[in-house]
Image: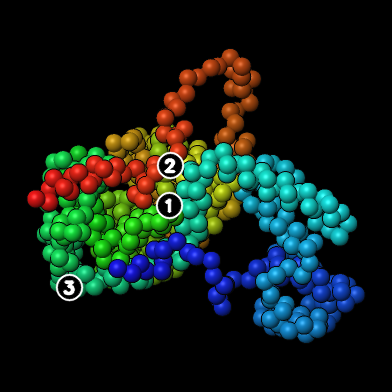
Amino acid sequence: MTTPAWNRTPAASPPAQDTPLDLLSLGRRVRHLRKAKGMTLDDLGAAVGTVASQLSLIENGKREPKLGLLQGLAGALGVPLAELLGAEPPSRRAALEIELERAQRGPLYESLGLPKVRLSSRLPMEVLESLVGLQGELERRLNEQVATPEEARRANAELRREMRERNNYFPEIEAQAQSVLDAVGYSAGPVSQHLIADMAAHLGFSLHHVNDLPHSTRSVTDLKNRRIYLTQSQRSDHDPRSVLLQALGHYVLGHDTPVSYGDFLRQRVATNYFAAALLLPEKPAVDYLRRAKAAKEIAVEDIRDTFAVSYETAAHRFTNLATEHLDIRTHFQKTHKSGIIYKAYENDGVTFPQDHTGAIEGQPSCRRWTSRVVFDVPDKFRAYNQYTDTPSGTYWCTARTERAASGEFSLSIGVPYAQVKWFRGRDTDIRGKSSCPDESCCRRPPSELAREWAGHAWPSARAHSHLLAAMPPGAFPGVDETEVYAFLAAHSG
């Protein structure tokens, strides 16, 4: 089986033709060429028909010039356009300036709370070398402290970045899901267990429900005998239809044994997407959402009820289709009652908390966000809606709580203020204000409490052993392969 390109861990390769401009490198190259020709910003601005302040923004990597201006700059600086857009910095100093500027814009530097160094020609070269070296060494040591979990967080952050760039929409998986739906004669309505059994049969698999499924698995697929084993237990947080469809997804999407944690994550996201694309097929789901948008009545609970899926599946599926088909940008959070974010996605500019790798999962959500406030709402039957003013803008969010074996979670979907007009619940008068990531927002105790209790409290932390453990080894993290192989041997006779 050939693994689709999006499901494989990306290998190093030359940048594609449509790779976005590296604005920092471009800006330093423009500055280098301008100074080499002895031109001031005013001189260059006069030559290309723009003001010096606009050129300054370009040189500092804060504005992307249009193609016409790029062509004008190349002509005024006496270089071909391809050279102006080249990948290599024009000098060692420019390379260091670019690296330091990127570092200062990154989450690690932000988390240190240090003032930013103003880059100028007067900054000594040895200071540049030292600052860049310190940044690199700090990141290396942080990575070294949590070597294997660090790999997981980096892989997760990279995958989320890719999902954001594609607006969490993957047409190739949609097409494969539609092919399966067509093969079993799906026409409309919720997808039944009977129809899903037909999908398994169409793909050549028989289904076997057992009571001794390995404890570390949700399902086990025997590729040798074309069998899928599922649990008979009703005590599960997962829709049995989704578990089976994810197992089929590995086969339909052509997955091979994962070669890295990043590969494992990509496969898991792809099979989750595949299952959702079968439970909420694209065409009827989009038709339904467009009608709801026209009526200004979009509601996640209505999507849930119409397609007979869980609230979490409905919310995830909304993120797949909202931007591509409805031109709505959105964000999603799954947050534990303790405040820790378990899952997150955004393409609407909301500022999630993140560590120095860019990872969001495992970070505490702001206490003033809808995803935290909803836990204290007495009415659990209705969706809770709230506007929240944040440093990156005002967002409207709708949330519900659900209880699982691992505790109580909130599931929230949010959109920027300008797009709330399409949603039911927009008339709420509940409003919060968050200044996170400023620690004074909710990371530090209120001053009056701190004055009274600082130094007089000694809590016994509920430290879970998994916080100290490395990531589970193996191609399928957390799965006991000996137990799985013994299970298959016992059932293959």
Tell me whether the residue at label 2 lies in contact with that at label 1, contact meaning CB atoms closer than 8 angstroms: yes
Distance, label 3 to label 1, CA atoms, is: 33 Å
Position above or below: 442 against 357:
above
Direction right: furthest residue = 38
Q: Residue at x 9, y 50 (%)?
A: 493
Q: Is residue 350 visible?
A: yes
Q: In the rendered structure, find residue 5 and report the number of the disc placed on it.
A: none
Q: Is residue 95 left or right of residue 180?
A: right
**Image coordinates for residue 124, horizontal then vertical, percent:** 87, 54
Query: Where, by quadrant of the figure, is residue 58 drawn?
Result: bottom right
Give the residue at x 72% y 42%.
114
Q: Which residue is mark 1?
A: 261
The residue shown at (65%, 68%) is 22
Q: Mark 3 or mark 2, which is nearer to you? A: 2
- Decide if residue 63 is in sight here: no
Please report whichever mark, 2 or 1, sits nearer to the chain's N-terminal start.
1
Q: Which residue is mark 2?
A: 471
Dividing the image into 4 quarters, which one contains the N terminus?
Answer: bottom left
Mark number, residue 183: 3
Which comes sooner in the sequence, label 3 or label 1?
3
For label 1, count other residues whose C-alpha is less than 10 Å away and answer few (under 14), some (14-19) or many (20+): many
Nearer to me, 448 or 109: 109
* Distance from the alpha carbon under mark 3 to that under mark 2: 40 Å
